Amino acid sequence: METKQIGTTDLRIPPVAFGCNVLGWTMDRKQSFKVLDELYEMGFNYMDTADVYSRWVDGHEGGESERILGAWMKERGLRGRIIVATKVGMDVGQGHIDLSRSHITQQIEKSLHNLQTDYVDIYFSHRHDPNVEVADVLETYAGLIKEGKVRHVGASSFPLDVFKKAIALHEQHELPKYQIYQPEYSILHRTDFENGYQDFVLQNDIAVTNYWALANGFLTGKYESIDDIKGTSRESNLKKYFDDKGMRVLKALQQVSQDTGISQAGVTIARTIAQPGITAPIVSATKPGQLQAFREAATNSLSKDHLAMLNKASLDG
């Protein structure tokens, strides 16, 4: 499996990243270990988590995902072979987005404890904090890098002007560089990334691991009509996709799937991998069988005609 470099670092990751938000949420510890085992055996060793996962569940406080991932790495003796990315800044009890020095230094200790490790490979600013100067955030990260607790840093869902400022500060003042960026991006949500961010990351050697690549499961082909989601926990998140554009995309995915023998999820991930600037889409799975789409996407390239068909179907209007 061909790996891709993270920015200008020495890290290389597989073409699909595993979204660990499901660990301890829709999967218990036993099922999580089973999926992680198969994932690793297939060669996928980049794990994307966050201190806030899965605080949104009643009775959860955040850190559930990190704790399961940490326990799995410890029990299997795999820490040195896993590339771990976690994030800081979302509300884990403080009531607001927080990238202050005190919060970051507190949360990195919690994350390291949860993950049962003394360092993380990539530490993300989960969201931009407008109340903290960008330079101050980068200086905090510089301290963590110097202490050996963080190897590299990344940013998620930043306003483009703020992200550009962060890269300029790196160049002007030798502060840490955000080596990796994490936007929402899928065949159904193209505009934000493709209009500005895409050119910028390509010009500045910044890796991209995009989230919601499967649009909450809509693009897997599991749901063919809005009737399929009525009364389910996914209804509120998925109903917006059942418009003319969404149905065109599903039809095109189905056609490419039939032509290639690849699952619709595999086609969707492969299409994302093929886009300029994308290093590895983040995809979750809750059953070992769902990991087949990872392998399909990593080992198959879509033809120019199929990519053109998908791009045309996903145009607005």
Image: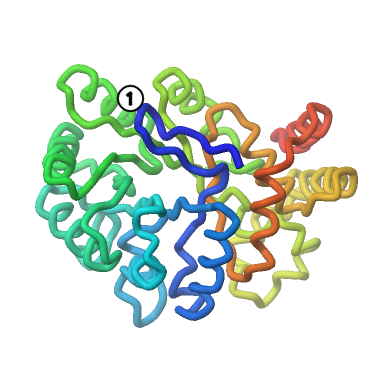
For the C terminus, which image quadrant? top right
Q: Position of residue 99 (x, y in %)?
A: 20, 48
| Left or right, 44 with reference to 77 | right
For label 1, count other residues whose C-alpha is less than 10 Å away and answer few (under 14), some (14-19) or many (20+).
some
Residue sitting at x 33%, y 63% = 52
| Left or right, 127 with reference to 112 | right
Residue sitting at x 76%, y 32% = 307
Q: Position of residue 309 (x, y in %)?
A: 81, 33
| Disc 1: which residue | 164
Q: Position of residue 43 (x, y in %)?
A: 56, 52
Q: Secondary structure at mark 1?
A: helix
Classify 256 as above or below 40: above
Label 1 amino acid? Lys
Residue sitting at x 45%, y 38% = 12
Q: Position of residue 28 (x, y in %)?
A: 48, 79
Classify 69 as above or below 254: below
Query: Residue 128 occupies which quadrant of the picture?
Result: top left
| Left or right, 250 with reference to 43 | right
Residue sitting at x 16%, y 32% = 135
Query: Residue 49 occupies which quadrant of the picture?
Result: bottom left
| Left or right, 101 with reference to 48 | left
Classify 223 as above or below 214: below
Query: Residue 218 occupies which quadrant of the picture?
Result: bottom right
For the N terminus, which image quadrant? top right
